[in-house]
Image: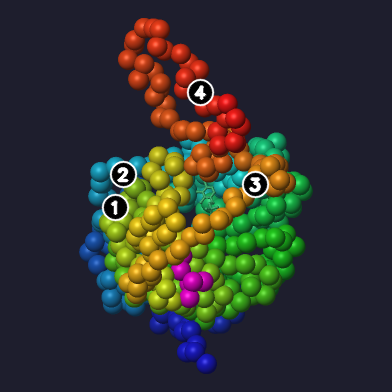
């Protein structure tokens, strides 16, 4: 048997009866947010004290459960850095933005982000159980007086209803699992009524901040809305307690496939060996590492940023060295709203017309001899090709390969290259119109 996970309670809470400690309502109503409260549990640094006393900083809240996982005397504790502000949050940096992913620009109605062709991000609340200092959505999250209205919810549902290409709805916020169960149930019910919504996903850090919230009743409710997937958010192995393991076990038993999204954070988890322990502990609690994100260019988060190379180094240290199931994808979420871009080490070293040279994680270099008689897939006899459903404006590089178009041009490309010239005898539009791309038509 592998070692069991630990369960911790800060000495300050020693006298709290178990039924209170294990009650999520008690945990939520006893969250800590001031210097006076927090220093009863951990020893604060001057920088933390300064930040906690500053006004205008992103909201602070920590559940008693989560603060108990911090080693109280260690100023570099990886959990503490995620939730206790320091003066570094007040430092600005080049290319810092309020909304670095331009989510609000890609939002057809308030709280709904439609960036990819077939799926939407639906923000259902601005509240969380505790607040991550590097929150990518700190521009809208945390304000206790500003959350999404009934009317905005109806607009979100209406948009999804009239947008049949949306087959996947990702609930986030804020944290959907802090909503009153009845409200969450209504949201899920309304989404399930829409025939083209095939899957629903929830992104939540409640299992990490407040595992006692993942009650059997909650799991019984969620189970009614399958196929339902859920991503949690763990950054460091110290966050994996017996309580979290019990919570993921309840969710897994309710048939919910579980993933993890983590953020690469300087001074928290920017180390191959920490990441290896993290992903091993995650698969032990039946959570599949999904994404590891490069930290966003968000205000207040500058001190958490690493070089992009660190993420590639981490993937190099995982892929092949451990179970494929335990290896997340390293993602840079494109500033300005380009969406998620996976990055990884290069495994393809060279190629000729029928041979590729590849290397493995050990540095073993080999060749793969390609067939000389491969008969290409014939779209004309493939019913899936005939009925392909890709969004016309968003086929991208696969559209180039598929022959939907022959090039992708930056905006104003034609105008720039026209050089304000004249229409002359050699300029004939028909010369640069493709004559049937790759379809074998004789011309
Ligand atoms: C991350 C994200 C998604 C989901 O992306 P997947 O790669 O499918 O997990 C969808 N919409 C938005 C706006 C996102 O940021």
What quarter of the picture does the C terminus occupy? top right
Are dots 2 and 1 in contact, CB under 8 Å? yes
What range of the chain is rendered magenta? 323-328
Are dots 4 and 3 in contact, CB under 8 Å? no
Residue ID at (59%, 62%)? 230
Are dots 2 and 4 in contact, CB under 8 Å? no
- Closer mark to the observer between disc 2 and disc 4: 4
| Residue 46, image x, y percentages | 22, 64
Q: Which mark is residue 378?
A: 3
| Gap in angstroms between the C-alphas marked 1 and 3 | 50 Å
Q: Mark 2 points at which residue?
A: 96
| Residue situated furthest left in the rendering | 46
Secondary structure of the residue carrying tag 3 is loop
Secondary structure of the residue carrying tag 1 is helix
Q: Name the residue under label 4.
A: 433
Q: Does the residue labelled 4 lie within 8 Å of ligand 1?
A: no
| Residue situated furthest bottom in the rendering | 1
């Amino acid at each position: 048997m592998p070692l069991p996970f630990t369960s911790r309670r800060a000495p300050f809470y020693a006298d709290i009866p178990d039924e209170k400690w294990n009650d999520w309502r008690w945990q939520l109503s006893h969250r800590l947010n001031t210097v006076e409260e927090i220093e009863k549990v951990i020893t604060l640094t001057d920088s933390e004290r300064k930040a906690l006393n500053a006004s205008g900083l992103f909201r602070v809240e920590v559940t008693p459960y989560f603060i108990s996982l911090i080693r109280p005397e260690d100023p570099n504790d990886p959990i503490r850095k995620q939730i206790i502000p320091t003066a570094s949050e007040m430092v600005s940096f080049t290319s810092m933005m309020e909304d670095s992913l331009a989510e609000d620009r890609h939002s057809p109605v308030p709280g709904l982000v439609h960036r990819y062709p077939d799926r939407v991000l639906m923000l259902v609340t601005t509240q969380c159980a505790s607040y991550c200092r590097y929150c990518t959505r700190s521009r809208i999250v945390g304000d206790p007086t500003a959350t999404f209205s009934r009317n905005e919810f109806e607009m979100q549902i209406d948009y999804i209803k009239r947008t049949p290409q949306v087959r996947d709805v990702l609930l986030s916020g804020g944290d959907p699992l802090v909503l009153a169960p009845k409200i969450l149930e209504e949201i899920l019910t309304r989404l399930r009524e829409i025939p083209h919504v095939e899957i629903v996903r929830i992104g939540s850090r409640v299992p990490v901040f407040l595992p006692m919230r993942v009650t059997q009743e909650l799991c019984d409710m969620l189970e009614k809305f399958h196929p339902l997937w859920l991503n949690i958010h763990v950054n460091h192995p110290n966050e994996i307690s017996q309580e979290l393991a019990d919570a993921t076990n309840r969710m897994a038993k309710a048939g919910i496939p579980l993933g993890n999204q983590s953020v690469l954070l300087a001074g928290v988890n920017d180390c191959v060996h920490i990441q290896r322990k993290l992903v091993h502990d995650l698969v032990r609690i039946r959570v599949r590492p999904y994404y590891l994100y490069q930290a966003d260019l968000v205000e207040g988060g500058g001190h958490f940023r690493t070089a992009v190379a660190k993420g590639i180094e981490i993937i190099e240290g995982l892929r092949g060295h451990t179970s494929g199931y335990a290896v997340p994808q390293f993602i840079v979420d494109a500033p300005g709203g380009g969406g998620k871009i996976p990055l990884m080490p290069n495994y393809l070293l060279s190629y000729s017309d029928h041979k590729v040279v590849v290397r493995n994680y050990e540095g073993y270099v080999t060749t793969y001899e390609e067939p000389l008689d491969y008969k290409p897939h014939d779209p004309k006899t493939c019913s899936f090709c005939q009925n392909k459903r890709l969004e016309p404006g968003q086929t991208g590089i696969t559209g180039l390969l598929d022959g939907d178009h022959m090039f992708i041009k930056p905006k104003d490309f034609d105008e720039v290259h026209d050089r304000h010239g004249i229409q002359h005898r050699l300029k004939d539009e028909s010369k640069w119109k493709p004559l049937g791309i790759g379809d074998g038509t004789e011309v």
